[in-house]
Amino acid sequence: MPARRMLTMRQLRRIMRLHHEGASARSTVQDALKRAAAAQLFWPLPDDLTDEVLEARLFARPGGGAGAGVRKRPEPDWGQLVRELRRPAVTMMILWEEYRQACPEGYGYSRFCELLRAFQQRLSPVMRQHHVAGDKLFVDYSGKRLGITDPVTGEIRMAEIFVAVLGASNYTFAEVTWSQALPDWIGSHVRLFAHLNGVPRLLVPDNLKSGVNKASFYDPEINRSYGRMTAHYDVGVLPARPKKPRDKAAVEAGVRFAQTYILGRLRNQTFFSLDEANAAVGIVMAQMNTRPMRKLGVSRADLLETLDRPALRPLPPTDYEYAEWKLVRVGLDYHVEVEGFYYSVPHALIRQQVDARITSSTVELFHKGQRIAAHQRRYGGARRHGTKVEHMPAAHRHYADWSPERFERWAAQIGPNTQGLIIAILARRPHPEQGFRTCMGVLRLYKGLEKARVESVSAYALAIGALNSKSVASILTHNLDLVVPAEEGASIDSHANVRGPLYFH
């Protein structure tokens, strides 16, 4: 065999010519001449004999092919060696030393490495690359989509196929989502990690905008929400370089294989929801992952358990909750507006810009990287203001315990007209809190008066729409409730000339 590795066909032709001319040769040359004689090739060679044909005749193997059985030295299980090479810290030197311990008459180190690399080259592209167990997880979307039918209209909506491939085991995860947008992209990662029951050291996404804002070899800019998710799981991100297909060969080959399994085997099925589609995809992917791979002799699921899973990092105690980030400015009332609701921050931050982290259940606010407030998220029907006492200036904390219900209880103790007036004052404001001081002012005006008079003033104020403390004070001062009966639909201005001006705002 050494002649084949050390000499080219051009050199072999020259050797045969020199031998024909009587020149002596060393052992390597003698081996080549013996091969030529065995193949009944003599100088001069035929003009139509190409290098390929010459090589085939000189180095042909019995029965054809390059089977291991024709080699003279003991053959290791090359598939097993490829699997072992993916374990952390395992090198070819270690594998060769173990091989020679078992087979002292086996191949030398250089020939051993040569044969092992040749075996690796015969693997599929996804299995050919060398990846350490638990190191990299490749993620991407399939270019093809799966149709889901609306059960009412019959309209078909196309859904995306998210695919992830573990580098060492080639274990493949896939699921169907409606889009490639950030919530679906991050949600697929959360479900992927839960499925694997662990996380790798690195994620290798393609340069999808949901994951990478700016592609760069030296300093890629990771999407902020995606970065928060990876920080939660303590996993690094190494985006594939643009126009570098070898960076993502594993996921691209895995995507193609998954597409064949998913789209090919599910082509005759009709799905009416994402849940139905994902249930079917889960069954198909289980079949794919448990099918033995021809060259390695074991399945992806077997390799997951023996290679990747023991090397994966443990999951954090809780799953990541998807959050949106938004830049907001603090108003003069030390509140920020998020989706139509208002949340307080420390009053010293008035007019400052802060970052809002918004989840389905909470609103967190950050200033210069530090969390300054956290609120339960408010939805329709709830009070629109979320105010914490510790965020208020000292002058405002006196009013922290006020509430619409408290003012209504105070008014109800006087009578139904007064209660109705307080309810009307609170209802007139966009936010009930804005009516608290007005209610306090009105109730103070009534202090020391008989209930009957208070009820009379309140009825008159309700009738003419006098829903502020100045107008109520004018009614009391000029005794309008006693002089002019309130008429339905009358305005406060219609009585202004009777007992002096009334004030309202």
Image (tube, rainbow, N blue to C red):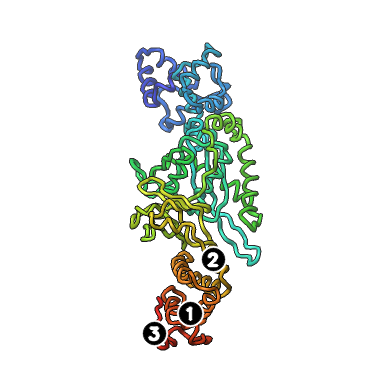
* Amino acid type, residue under disc 2 in the picture: Trp
Q: Is residue 255 visible?
A: no
Can you say which quadrant of the picture contains the C terminus? bottom left
Whether residue 240 is situated above or below residue 135 in the rendered picture: below
Label 1 secondary element: loop
Residue 93 placement, left or right of 157: left
**Residue at (48% x, 79% y) in the render:** 465
Circle 2 packing at 10 Å, graded few (<14), some (14-19), many (20+), is some
Find disc 1 in the rendering and name its residue: 465
Q: Nearer the viewer, residue 241 or 201?
A: 201
Of marks 3 and 1, which one's residue comes earlier in the chain?
1
Q: Quadrant of residue 52?
A: top left
**Looking at the picture, how far across and down is residue 134, in whole percent?**
51, 32
- Which label number is shown at residue 500? 3
**Looking at the picture, how far across and down is residue 448, in whole percent?**
49, 70
Residue 111 placement, left or right of 171: left
Distance Cα–Cα, label 3 vs label 2:
30 Å
Q: Nearer the viewer, residue 236 or 396?
A: 396
Circle 3 packing at 10 Å, graded few (<14), some (14-19), many (20+), is few
Label 3 secondary element: loop
Of marks 3 and 2, which one's residue comes earlier in the chain?
2
Label 2 secondary element: helix
Q: Is residue 445 visible?
A: yes
* Amino acid type, residue under disc 3 in the picture: Gly
Distance Cα–Cα, label 1 vs label 2:
21 Å
Find disc 2 in the rendering and name its residue: 410
Which of label 1 and label 2 is nearer to you? 2
**Residue at (50% x, 49% y) in the render:** 322
Whether residue 297 is situated above or below residue 281 in the rendered picture: above
Circle 1 packing at 10 Å, graded few (<14), some (14-19), many (20+), is some
